[in-house]
Amino acid sequence: MKELLIYIARNLVDSPDDVNVTERVDGDRTVYELRVAPDDMGKVIGRHGKIAKEIRALMRSVAQRQGLHISVDIVD
């Protein structure tokens, strides 16, 4: 799951080397914290948060097929 999120984020941003994902377990849910360069934050969030919503929906869909519960936080 972490690799998928890194792959998606690196293909959206101008500075793919600055993409960092940390994983932490919160009860039965795994939380992925996505960090990108400050200049790339808009590319990951998108207009009105549309890209961020789609990233979260895609990740939840893949996790659901594997029987996992996840959430994605975009951290600045």
Image: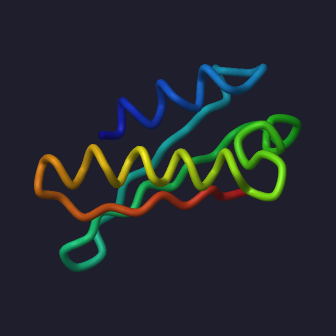
Q: Quadrant of the N terminus?
A: top left
Q: Is residue 53 left or right of residue 37?
A: left
Q: Residue furthest left?
A: 67
Q: Residue at 78%, 45% (x, y): give it.
A: 46
Q: Quadrant of the C terminus?
A: bottom right
The number of numbered badges drawn on the structure is 0
Left or right of residue 31, residue 51 in this image: right
User: Where does residue 43 sit, x and y in percent of width and height?
Assistant: 78, 37
Residue 7 in the image: state x and y as whole percent: 47, 24
Residue farthest along the right direction in this orientation: 39
Residue at the image position 67 percent from the left and 26 percent from the top:
12
From this viewpoint, which residue is outermost toward the bottom? Answer: 27
Q: Measured from the top left, where is residue 68 in percent x and y?
A: 18, 58
The image's colour scheme reads rainbow
Q: To which quarter of the image does residue 67 belong?
A: bottom left
**Vertical relation: 71 (above or below) 28:** above
Residue at left 74%, top 21%? 15
Image height of 46 relative to 49, above or below: above
Q: In this view, does 50 lie above or below 43?
A: below
Between residue 5 and residue 20, name the one nearer to us.
5
Q: In this view, does 47 lie to the left or right of 32?
A: right
**Residue 17 coordinates in the image, percent (x, y):** 64, 21
Residue appearing at x 53%, y 45% in the figure: 55
Q: Which of 49 and 74 is in front in this view?
A: 49
Write down the quadrant of residue 10 in the picture.
top right
